Amino acid sequence: MLSAAQFSAGLLEFRMVTRVLLIDDDAELLTLLEEFLGGEGFEVGKAGDGEEGLRLAREWAPDLVVLDVMLPRLAGFEVLRRLRETSAVPVLMLSARGEPVDRIIGLELGADDYLAKPFNPRELAARIRAVLRRGKGNDGEGRLEVGDLVLDPGARVALRGGVPVDLTGTEFALLEALLRQAGTVVRRETLFRQVLGRRPTAFDRSLDVHISNLRKKLGPLPDGRERIATIRGVGYQAIRPGGVK
């Protein structure tokens, strides 16, 4: 017979409802989003400042965090930085002014996506689902090996030379898309649609920042070349060791 603790642990393991944690100091917006996302089938948690948000992100175990840049007590960027020290939970940043610099900093710190205020709640829900799909990936395609890189979509594991590489859900999905066509140029438009779930727009550097983060985490090839080459005006290419760039 299961103990109460074992039963509770089982409920957590098989929890089907997606938990979304909202961290924003706009109480009216939090209430609106809680009602809307609750109606969309999400379980919603709320925090009105950075310190409370970081605590809930660690203790409540959300499936995704929606994090505002401007927060009292602890700024959104600092919340993200501390969270990334111990967790790969998907994070969608909110930027009040939609400033490009805010977006770039957030992505460089490990955010999976961003959305500028004001926004339509339906777009937020769509972005949340897109980010969550990246984290789940395609489990039926099998593992990928390119040089010393090994990617196992089913286990959500990335290895370089047998050593695990800590990737966000977006970074993992981006690397998977490139490795599946290693040696072939993948167009920017294709990566935007397949990985980020939207069409590219003018001055949107989110894809470039994710690529930059991947390069830093993966390091160069043994011969010093980048593992991911930029084909200017076209897209990106995962380089096969020993092949021609």
Image: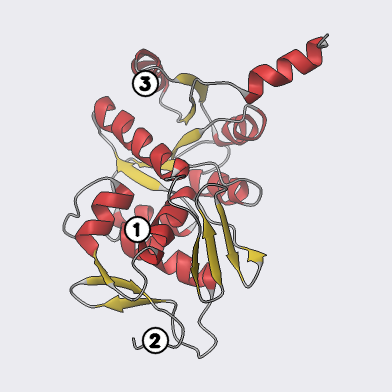
What x and y, as percent, mark residue 59? 67, 29
- Judge by depth and name the residue closer to the eye, 154 or 119: 154
Q: Is residue 182 visible from the viewing direction of this image?
A: yes
What residue is at 83 percent from the left and 11 percent from the top? 3
Label pair 1/3, CB-CB below 8 angstroms:
no
Q: Which mark is residue 67?
A: none
User: Position of 3 compared to 41: left or right?
Assistant: right
* Mark 3 to mark 2 CA distance (whole Å): 50 Å
Q: What residue is disc 1 on? A: 101
Check residue 243 in the rendering and tell me which mark sits there, or answer none. 2
Residue positioned 43% across, 61% down in the render: 175
In the image, residue 199 lies at what x, y percent? Answer: 19, 50
Please tell me which of labels 2 and 1 falls first in the chain: 1
Residue 228 picture location, percent across and down: 39, 74
Q: Amino acid at mark 2?
A: Gly
Q: Give, as a three-letter code, the residue at label 1.
A: Val
Q: Secondary structure at mark 3?
A: helix
Q: Quadrant of the N terminus?
A: top right
Frontmost of labels 2 and 1 is 2
- What residue sits right under mark 3 in the picture? 33
Give the residue displayed 32% in from the left and 57% down from the top: 206
Along the polypeptide, which appears first: circle 3 or circle 2? Answer: 3
10 Å neighbourhood of mark 3: few (<14), some, or many (≥20)?
some
